[in-house]
Amino acid sequence: MTADDVRELLKKACQKAGSNRAWAQANEVSPAYVSDVLLGRREPGPAILDPFGLEAVEERRVTYRRKKNASRTVTRKIPNVT
């Protein structure tokens, strides 16, 4: 589940509660925090996740970059295509 999925859950829960403020008060969360999460300005934290029975899970993601001071460069000949 992504942060956007959580935002959608939160949006529906706020609608069901009658407003963002009503959901925030019922769950002892700042209405400003709820608004920030819904607008994507902040990531959902435990105060938002707990009422849904969710927790954040950090996944390792591999990225690649050029080596610093690379000692050699690989050159490939590209055949002429005519």
Image (cartoon, grey):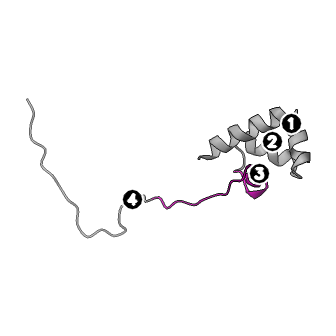
Figure check: 65 above or below 42: below
Q: Amino acid at mark 2?
A: Ser
Q: From which residue to which does the magenta span run?
A: 43-61
Image x and y of residue 52, in percent: 73, 49
Image x and y of residue 36, in percent: 77, 44
Give the mark, 4 or 1, whose residue is nearer the N terminus.
1
User: Does the residue at mark 2 contact the one at mark 1 (Cβ under 8 Å)?
Assistant: no
User: Does the residue at mark 3 contact the one at mark 4 (Cβ under 8 Å)?
Assistant: no
Q: Amino acid at mark 4?
A: Tyr
Label 2 – label 1 distance at C-alpha: 14 Å
Q: Mark 2 against mark 3, which lies toward the viewer?
A: 3
- Residue at image position (60%, 59%) is 57
Give the mark, 2 or 4, whose residue is nearer the N terminus.
2
- Residue at image position (39%, 59%) is 64
Residue located beneath label 2 in the image: 35
Q: Secondary structure at mark 4?
A: loop
Give the mark, 1 or 3, whose residue is nearer the N terminus.
1
Residue located beneath label 4 in the image: 64
